[in-house]
Image (cartoon, rainbow, N blue to C red):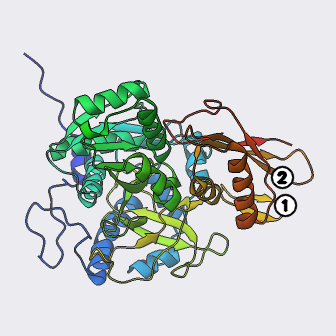
Amino acid sequence: MNPAPPAIPEACRQRAPSRRKPVSLDSQAKDGATVSADSLSRPEIERLQWRKLAALLDTVTSANRFYAAKLSGGGAIRSLDDFREHVPLTTKRELVADQLAHPPYGTDLSHPFECYTRCHQTSGSTGAPLRWLDTPDSWQHLLDNWRQIFAAAGVGRGDRLFFAFSFGPFLGFWTAIESAQQLGCFCFPGGSMTSPARLKAMLDHRVTVLCCTPTYAVHLGEVAQAEGLDRSKSCLRRIIVAGEPGGSLPSTRAHLAALWPEARVFDHYGMTEVGPATYECPAEPGVLHVIESAYLAEVLDTTAGAPTPAGETGELVLTTLDRLGSPLLRYRTGDLVRPRHPGRCACGRHELALEGGILGRTDDMVVVRGVNVFPSAVEEIVRGCGEVAEYRVRLDGRGSMTELSLEVEPAPECSDVPALGRRLQQRLQDALSLRVPVAILPGGALPRFEMKSSRWVRTAH
């Protein structure tokens, strides 16, 4: 006889309310329902956010050592505006220092250790990796966020999903596949498979939805062309991408549409430390909506810290309203976005809309001979030029000024390789006001990426 499962500690029950408990909004929520913001007016969204935020603040000030210390001595918080005014920003550097000082998980924990059942880790692509813990309740909230992403993409029961990831400690893979399973979808985890094997599996299992990075979707499409894939046998109708800004870049989307004409691309955005935070607008490709039932979002000037006006670029700052076990208050994501003017979107929603999705990162920008250059701008130019299979950017900082050069692997259908090099060099000159040398490499010379791409290579001083 199997032993009975251990009981949930009482401390966890008291501090982590069940996900089935409805969030009441003037008694409009049906019993047992999870309220999302996609059907609410702007005032209703803000009232829901304040109710969740008040509960979050009550939890962290009484039980979370990291935030109890961080919030001590602050002003009274009686509204969302008070919160923005009195609560300091949280940085990744603080969190890393906290975990180093209090290994292995730091002090940003609101419950006893026995309450936590999940541990995930950031990639470390922008610094030291962070370990992040979740209780069953906070984990379920993340799965509910993915449910909204799937709903916006038109994915539901009956769909057959292929996850082209080598599953590791990063949170996004696991939340996506577990949420899809809860929806009743067929799920195939394609880790450790070669690209041709993945394509065969997608055909054999009549896959309708592919989940991967934009870079890998491009690579898989190119392999499909090289392998002579019979697209008439494919059932693919959606490609859900994340992990890189390319999912919302017009040129990358156009490239994907040419490679996968039968499928629409849907972008979204998330981080291990905050969870899945946005979904692509169903009515306007390239626009991301923040899931405002689960996040309080701000867009701030990267230097002054003041709110960024609509239509201008600033840093996305997020507060996790449902992840009580390991919360983040006013977390500087480091990601650059351009908020739209408030109002009803073409899809009917009032949630914050980010034009162009994630535009880049605050730490991605490089200064080349006095010109600010972002990786997303270079990708837009390269992909917009066409006939490029892969590329790599080299930054040489050994001289008095950083120099930038481009290495390009032409696509097999490119009929005039020298002309491609000249065209790229001219477009980079026109867009960036920089002379960028372009080197043409033979086919297969550049690496392909399954995870986040690493196309920018720096030569140190």
Q: Quadrant of residue 206?
A: top left
**Is residue 74 in view from this perspective?**
no
Rendered view: 381 above or below 312: above
Determine which of the numbered discs, if any, sits on residue 369 in the image.
1
Asked which secondary structure carries label 1, the reply is loop
- In percent of the image, x 66 and y 55: which residue is there? 364
Q: Is residue 81 left or right of residue 144?
A: right
Which mark, by number, is residue 313?
none
**Amino acid type, callout 2:** Thr
Q: Quadrant of residue 9?
A: top left
Quadrant hosting residue 132: top left
- Quadrant where the C terminus is found in the figure: top right
Q: Residues within 10 Å of mark 2 (few under 14, many from 20)?
A: some
| Residue furthest right as drawn | 400
Residue located 21% across and 49% down the image? 13
290 vs 405: above or below: below
Q: Residue furthest top?
A: 1
Counting from the top left corner in percent of width and height, residue 418 is at 73, 45
Asked if the residue at tag 1 contacts the one at tag 2, i.e. Cβ–Cβ closer than 8 Å, the answer is yes
Direction from residue 135 to residue 398 in the image, left or right: right
The disc label shown at residue 402, or none: 2
Q: Is residue 219 left or right of residue 230?
A: right
The answer to which of 149 and 283 lies nearer the viewer is 283
Distance, label 2 to label 1, CA atoms, is 7 Å
Q: Secondary structure at mark 2?
A: loop
Q: Note whether residue 320 is visible.
A: yes
Q: Of the residues under marks 2 and 1, which one precedes in the sequence? A: 1
Image position, residue 164 (x, y; %): 38, 35
Give the camera-side residue of 226 and 136: 226
> 319 or 197, which lies in front?
197
Q: Residues within 10 Å of mark 1 (few under 14, many from 20)?
A: few
Residue 44 image point, x, y percent: 26, 80
